[in-house]
Each structure stands twice: as C-alpha cells, then as structure tokens.
Image (cartoon, helix red, strand yellow):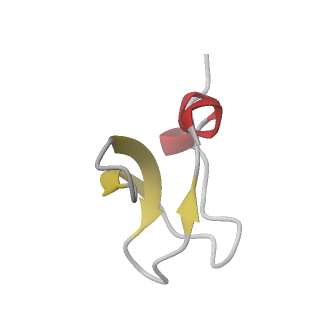
Amino acid sequence: MVSEYDLPCSECGDSLVRAEVTTADGSVLVVAECQNCGGRHYPESALRRV
C-alpha cells in the first residue's frame, strides 16, 4: 500500500517526511511535510480527526 510519504510533494515535487502538528485543542496529528517548500499533506487518518 502506498502512503503519503511515498509520494512527492504536490507543490514542488520534493520528498515528504513525517511530521507532528499540534492542533488548537492540544491533540497531535501526524502529517506528511515537505522539507523543501513547507507544504503539508494530511493523511486520511488526520483528516478524520480534524
């Protein structure tokens, strides 16, 4: 199965890495983030929690 981390950034084409983001309510979401342009891509599991 392909995950978000296997795909290139849709904004610049660079690699995505795992990153943690804290929401306003204090919970932590795992997202795919581009180290080149800073673009974030939210896995389906993160979107369900938002």
Q: Residue at x 59, y 43 (%)?
A: 50
Q: Residue at x 61, y 47 (%)?
A: 7
* Depth order, front residue of 25/37: 25
* Depth order, front residue of 49/35: 49
Q: Residue at x 32, y 42 (%)?
A: 27
Return the residue found at the far bottom.
37
Q: Is residue 25 above or below residue 9?
A: above
Q: Quadrant of the N terminus?
A: top right
Return the residue found at the far front.
25
Q: Residue 21: x percent and y percent?
A: 34, 56
Left or right: 16, with 45 as reference point? left
Return the residue found at the far top.
1
- Residue 10 lies in quadrant: bottom right
Q: Residue at x 29, y 49 (%)?
A: 26
Q: Residue 13: x percent and y percent?
A: 63, 70
Q: Residue 34: x percent and y percent?
A: 45, 68
Q: Is residue 29 above or below residue 40?
A: above
